[in-house]
Image (cartoon, rainbow, N blue to C red):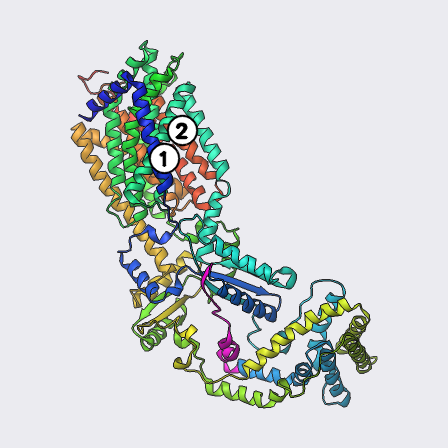
Amino acid sequence: MIAALILRLVAASVRRPVFAALACLVLAGIALAYAATGFSMTTDTAALISPKVAWRQNEKAVETAFPNLTDVLLVIVDGKTPELAEAAAAKLTDALAADSKHFRRAERPDGGAYFAKQGLMFGSLADVKAATDALIKAQPLLGPLARDPSLRGVAGAFGTALTGVEQGSAKLADLDRPMRSLGNALDATLAGRPAFFSWQELMASSGGDQAPPRRRLILAQPRLDYGALQPGEDAVAAIQQQATKLGLDGAHGVSVRTTGEVPLADEEFATLEENIGIVGLIMALAMLVTLWLATRSAKIVAAIVVTIIAGLVITTAAGLLAVHTLNLISVAFIPLFVGLGVDFGIQISVRFNAERLDGHATPEALRRAATALSAPLALAAGAVFLGFGAFLPTDYIGISELGIIAGIGMVIALLLSITLLPALLTLLKPGAPRREVGFREAAPVDRWLHTHRKAVLWAFALSMLVSIALLPFVRFDFNPLHLRNPDGPAMRALADLMHDPLRTPNTINLLAPNADAAKTLAARLAKLPEVDEAVTVDGFVPEDQPGKLALLQDASLLLDATINPFDMAPAPSDAEDAAALNATAGQLRTVAGASADTSAQDARRLAGLFARLASAPPTIRARAREVLVTPLGVMLDQVRATLQAEPVTRATLPPEIANDWVAKDGRALIQVFPRGDSNDNAVLRRFTSAVRAVAPDASGLPVATQEAAGTIAWAFIEAGVLALVLISGLLFLVLRDVREVGFTLAPVVLSGFLTLGSCVLIGQPINFANIIAFPLLFGVGVAFHIYFVMAWRGGATDLLQSSLARAVLFSALATGSAFGSLWLSHHPGTASMGKILMISLAWTLVCALIFEPALLGPPRKGRKA
């Protein structure tokens, strides 16, 4: 019935080509207008998998309780000194928090008033003792610096320390570190090189376990536009603008980088856009050249191209009507439609040429081509439609919606191929072909396949067994980070950050009924060998507080008057700074004397630098003030805050910290960190399995990555089995022969196994991006083999010499050469998709042109060609 309908539609289009062409093009115009106004696409990767699956529900529960965990943008502030990093992070956080246009919130997870006061308390008791001892030891320097934070005060502080050396209460060697550090900074300043100096590092205990950190983090939640290809682009640009405005750059000893899920996703789309023009141009040229080689007619090529473009426009509109919003996977209907739409056009056009070579005029040639191809085309379109429709019931919404749109597209492609294409060919009146349409040169291959049929089948059977044996070695790498360009700024920043095991994004989140339950569960999880640490709200309450507070209170009693002087010196003039530097230079020379030891050499060097700075132009001293005095204020404020540490309990935690870990309904968050290389898939698998054995409702990036992999793999298995059942049923209804159904599907299955085996041999893992190649492989493969089986069933012989073989060959080349150009993309995922498309189409072609004819053998008796 469908074949008869196809014949009538072709005949009607040939009789009234102008009407048929106009009707199709008007429909395409209406579809274009609708698609242009109603086009909607989301780049939200969370929308790709059904929210009904258990792990997505766990993920949603955490996100609902703690919305600060979603759409996170992480700003990494690195300074040449701890003071520069701290000052830069504080200024940038304030600027971002005030920018309500681009950000919903901005906070410092490792800084702010609470950590300034209590930060030292999070170290061990030994760390606190070492830090307080170092401060007490530095008291001779701290006093003059706190009373006079200027170049005069710096020089005076050294003068005071040198007086102690002269009086015998101290040794010159005690000043080795300060003299050497200060000398290095002044040497660079006087030479015009970038110079940076840290009082915090100078005051830190050389025996302490932890040096003052030079990195600070800012967590921001930007306002995203999911209708844009890069939803967070404006927010990232706003961060860079604020950093520039505040002078946070390399020239000032600060670097500001962004990473996190938002900039990483944006960077991925930017990589996709990077050379899309060149890839698209190569794709179009490859398609046009292949179409011309297939048809040897520019007019036929033009007719096919117009048909494909019209079909693509109509399919886009139909897809938007069906799913309303395209996603990152469903948008792949474009290559699927073009690949299969080209096949229909080539099949009709090549057979049309073959009929004209036999002397038939254009209308009659089109009717005869339709008579020969109506049943195979209808069956191929129906089989591909069912194949894509099999994805509909899966939990992988991305591929499910792709199946809906691609299935609709197959119907549209077939309808336009039997209406618009014949009408255009009738109107354009392409010239008759001048050479054989088939491949007469393939006659020896046909004969060889006939005489060596068993050997060929055994060879393919062996290759099938080898491919099946290689299946356990197929790597499924569904780590989304491995699909991104490793040279992208956000990706490089993340790779740098992941060297710190407690800053990795690969953490697992858990919800507990309350904070006490969270503490108990965290203690249990922390004992697992796969877990490095389990953090709860109680992690922000320091341990061993009595002992640490005692040490800090003792230091405060000794240092309070030192760092909080009553009589602050008035700001000096430039001349007073110069005079103080000269005075201390003389004192340094006196103390050093003629001694040749290291301390004396350092003292003489610093004396020379002080003298040079005193005699330098005022602009050089102004630069020295920026290098030495500016961080001095940051250090003194930090010391004052540290010495004011107080007892902390869960109840007295600041709201901005407590609210991030305990929800309004009392539920508490647990964040679990992996032990080992968190970018290693094997480490993450063991970590996730161990945690979920204790807490099955875990969520977070490691869980999402692995569960998404399972969901996607199961979706393809489920859809593959369903498609096999549906297509087998359709083929049996039409062919009424189990053997012929097997002849059609066996090569498709074989090409799939050969593709997977090839991936093993070349070391290509299957990932989120390149797995899309398999629906295309399936669709094209089913169509090709239906054409051959239907021709053989009708009594055709010498299949490789026929126009059908030419159509199949160039159809595969058109699809392969066009979409193989994706291999040139700078995006790793897209490039791997192009690679697998090329491999799969190559095996599909081998199975269609070699295995299929050998499998079919000679036509059954009683059938005519």
Q: Is residue 791 left or right of residue 679?
A: left
- Toward which corner of the image does residue 520 lie, by quadrant? bottom left
Quarter occupied by the C terminus? top left
Quarter occupied by the N terminus? top left
Which residue occupies 67% across, 87% down? 567
- State which tag comes first along the sequence, 1 or 2: 1
Q: Nearer the viewer, residue 87 or 678?
A: 87
Q: Nearer the viewer, residue 101 or 152?
A: 101
- Amino acid at pointer 2: Leu
Start-end of magenta stretch: 101-126
Relative to 370, does residue 694 appear above or below in the rendering?
A: below
- Toward which corner of the image does residue 317 lie, by quadrant? top left
Mark 1 surroundings within 10 Å by alpha-carbon count, few (fewer than 14), some (14 through 19), many (20 or more): many
How far apart are the two marked residues, 1 and 2, measured between alpha carbons?
29 Å
- Amino acid at pointer 1: Leu
Image location (x, y in percent) of residue 39 = 36, 42
Image location (x, y in percent) of residue 23 = 30, 26
* Residue located farthest toward the right when viewing the structure as drawn: 594
Image location (x, y in percent) of residue 153 = 71, 80
Indicate whether residue 495 is drawn in magenta.
Answer: no
Q: Nearer the viewer, residue 590 or 638?
A: 638
Tag 2, which secondary structure?
Answer: helix
Residue occupied by mark 1: 32
- In front of the other: label 1 or label 2? 1
Relative to 147, does residue 513 appear above or below in the rendering?
A: above
Q: Nearer the viewer, residue 770 or 89?
A: 89
Q: Are marks 1 and 2 in contact (CB under 8 Å)?
A: no
Which residue occupies 36% across, 33% down? 339
Residue occupied by mark 2: 813
Relative to 45, does residue 156 appear above or below in the rendering?
A: below
Which residue occupies 39% across, 47% down? 767
Image location (x, y in percent) of residue 311 = 33, 31
